[in-house]
Structure formats: C-alpha cells, structure tokens
Image (cartoon, rainbow, N blue to C red):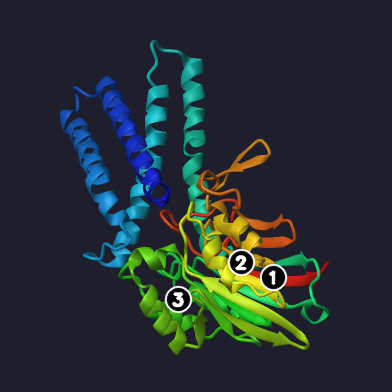
C-alpha cells in the first residue's frame, strides 16, 4: 500500500504526459503550415521527444527522496517545472484539437478565439495557487470537545506546525513568519508533526535552526513524518531537534501537569497506510490521564481511538493541497488514501485534527487548502 501510495501518482502523471505528447505530435502533423515550416515543426517534435524521455527517465529518479546527486533546490525546481509542463501540454493539446476545422466557419472561429482564455484558465489557477501557498498563511483556531476532560485542561491550547517541507518554495522567511505566528498564540504546548524537509540534501539544520525559536509554556515536542523516513534523516533530525530544545517523541511519551490534571503526550514515527499500528499505540496510552498522540499519518486514527487516545494530531495530507470542487465535494489525491483529509473528526469519544500544514510537495501550489498554523483548544464536553 505504501509503495502504491508513493509511486502510483508518478506513473499516472507520466502516462498522462505521454498521451498528451502523442496527441500534440498528431496535431502538429495536421497543421496547414507544418510542411511550409519544416524546421519549426521539427523543433516542436524534438521538444516533445526530449520531454517524453525526461518524464520517463529523469522524473522517477528525481522523485526518489533519497536521491542526492544533485542540489536539492535544483531537484525541487525541476520536478515543479515538469508538472507545470504536463498541465501546459494538456491544455495545448485540447486547444489544438479544437482549432482544427473541417471547413471555414466564422462562428466557429469566433468561438475558438474566445476559448483560448478558457483553456488557459488552469494556468491562471496555478498562478493563484502559487501565491496562496506562499502568502496565504494564517492561524486556524479549532475547539476540540473531549468528553470527561479534567477541569484544569479546559481551555488548554496546543499550537501545531506540520508539513513544513523547508526548501525553495517554503523557505526561511516563510518559516520565520509561521514560528512568529505560533508564538503569538501563547500556547501551553507546541508540537511539530513531521515532514520538516522533503528529500535528502534539503537544509534540515536550517529548518530546525528556525524552529528552535518556538515557545510554549510546557515545551516543544514532535514526531517524524514520511519524508524524514524516505530521506533517511530521522536520526539526524532527532539529534538536531534535541540540541535546539525540541523533544522528538519517537515511540515515547511525556507526562505534563496542569494544575491537578495530567496530560500524557505521546508521539510515534510515521507509519504507512495499511500498517497495523494498534500494538505500537496501545502501550503509550495511560488511563489516569488525558491522552494526546502525535502521528503524522491521519489514516491511523481508528487505531489511536482503540488504544485509548482522546486526541490525535496529524498532518500528511496538506488538506488535499490541490482541491477540485465537484458539486458539493472537494476532489483531491489525498482522498484516494484516507478519509481523514482536513480538519476535525470524531470516532466515539476520540478526536482527530488534521492540519493543512505549511509547505507543498510537487508543484508549489495550494488550491482550497491554504497553509495554516493550527491552534487547538481543548474544551470540556
């Protein structure tokens, strides 16, 4: 399941690109001026051949998060531009297919002239999504009602940062702003729930050097996400985090006291969807305390509920990152792997909050899922 989750989207994108290239190749051959301008037509076909080879050979290698032969920023930009190329190729193919008239028709020509802005709308949407991903950060406050919550924990504030993906598209300025916004909440507890970086070679030390400025009354805690695992930096991240005053709870827990109440804060490294996590979660819960679990992947909420956790804080989905509204639903890639995509969920007496997170993966675009600093407020039921 984890292998499928990682590679199925890549394979699908490559197949769609090759299909678009095949369509463009055919439409180029049908253009009236193709024979009159053989050099231009040849250059266009050469570009299609090169991009086909790039998508088939280079993209899968660059997508491997442990690949570190090239600078991480170069890889990030190369993958982002590759995905924008896919979008542009699809738009151009559909438009070229539409502009091939069987005979001259003035009404059809006017319609096609008007259709070009419509065909380019997805590129405009991508531009808006880039701006939203970079400048749309805000604090999202969420009250979580927990049955039987001790009186001294009523109103307790937990600020959450997740899915930072520190790099060229969410860099020092953006993370510094997120940390400042988190500190302004004056939370009792601060947590970081994984995906500090994206791939091997990313500036892990720079990321944690900024996160050390996080402040909270009871301390700063965290867990690792899938990208620390894929990049092979979980151990290094743990050591650096400890040096900067951040305790990574890797299968561990800590008891925090607020008045007469005890809060058991536990954290577990990322588990792939489909993994049976109950044996890992159950020993970390404590009956005499309010139990909060940090786990990057929200798909494991049912096991957290069975283990006795009152609240689980997760990220991983980016809130879908790119949501396409269809009727009353938001369609996104994350929904193919989990029903827990964004916001609060309930299962019996247990609660889950899935943060949209801060950074992006693939294209630096967010649509319908703006970046957030999450402020969770515990409320008595």
Say which quadrant the C terminus sits in: bottom right
Mark 2 residue element: strand
Residue marked by disc 3: 172
Query: Mark number for residue 313?
Result: 2
Foreground residue, 324 or 26? 324
Mark whose residue sits in front, 3 or 1: 1
Q: Which residue is farthest top?
A: 103
Q: Position of residue 296 (x, y in %)?
A: 52, 64
Seen in the picture, residue 52 relative to 31 is either above or below; the reply is below
Residue contact between numbered discs 2 and 1, judged by CB atoms under 8 Å: yes
Residue 328 lies in what quarter of the image? top right
Query: Mark number for residue 376?
Result: 1
Answer whether residue 353 is visible to the viewer in this image: no
Mark 1 residue element: strand
Mark 1 residue crowding within 10 angstroms, few (<14) / some (14–19) / many (20+): many
Foreground residue, 264 or 286? 286
Residue located 41% across and 52% down the image: 2
Mark 2 residue crowding within 10 angstroms, few (<14) / some (14–19) / many (20+): many
Rounded to the nearest angstrom, the CA distance separating label 2 from label 1 is 9 Å
Mark 3 residue element: helix
């Amino acid at each position: 399941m984890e292998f499928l989750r990682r590679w199925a989207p890549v394979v699908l994108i490559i197949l769609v690109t090759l299909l678009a290239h095949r369509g463009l190749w055919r439409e180029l051959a049908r253009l009236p001026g193709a024979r009159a301008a053989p050099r231009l037509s040849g250059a266009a076909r050469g570009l299609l051949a090169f991009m086909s080879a790039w998508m088939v050979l280079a993209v899968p290698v660059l997508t491997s998060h442990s690949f570190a032969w090239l600078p991480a920023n170069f890889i990030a930009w190369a993958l982002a531009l590759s995905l924008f190329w896919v979008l542009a190729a699809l738009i151009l193919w559909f438009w070229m297919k539409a502009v091939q008239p069987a005979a001259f028709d003035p009404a059809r020509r006017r319609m096609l002239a008007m259709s070009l802005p419509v065909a380019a709308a997805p590129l405009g949407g991508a531009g808006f999504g880039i701006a939203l991903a970079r400048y749309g950060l805000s604090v999202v406050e969420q009250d979580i009602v927990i049955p039987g919550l001790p009186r001294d924990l009523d109103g307790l504030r937990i600020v959450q940062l997740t899915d930072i993906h520190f790099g060229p598209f969410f860099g020092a300025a953006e993370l510094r702003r997120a940390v400042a916004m988190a500190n302004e909440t004056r939370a009792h507890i601060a947590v970081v729930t994984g995906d500090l970086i994206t791939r091997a070679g990313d500036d892990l030390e720079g990321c944690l050097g900024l996160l050390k400025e996080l402040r909270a009354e009871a301390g700063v805690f965290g867990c690792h996400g899938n990208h620390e695992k894929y990049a092979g930096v979980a151990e290094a991240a743990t050591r650096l985090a400890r040096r900067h005053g951040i305790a990574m709870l890797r299968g561990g827990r800590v008891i925090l006291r607020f008045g007469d109440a005890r809060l058991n804060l536990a954290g577990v490294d990322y588990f792939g969807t489909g993994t049976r996590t109950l044996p890992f979660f159950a020993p970390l819960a404590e009956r005499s305390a309010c139990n909060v679990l940090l786990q990057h992947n929200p798909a494991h909420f049912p096991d957290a509920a069975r283990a006795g956790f009152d609240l689980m804080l997760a990220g991983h989905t980016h809130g879908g990152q790119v949501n396409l509204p269809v009727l009353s639903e938001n369609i996104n890639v994350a929904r193919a792997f989990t029903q827990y995509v964004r916001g609060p969920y309930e299962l019996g007496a247990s609660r889950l909050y899935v943060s949209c997170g801060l950074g992006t993966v693939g294209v630096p675009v967010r649509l319908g899922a703006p970046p957030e600093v999450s402020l969770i407020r515990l409320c008595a039921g």
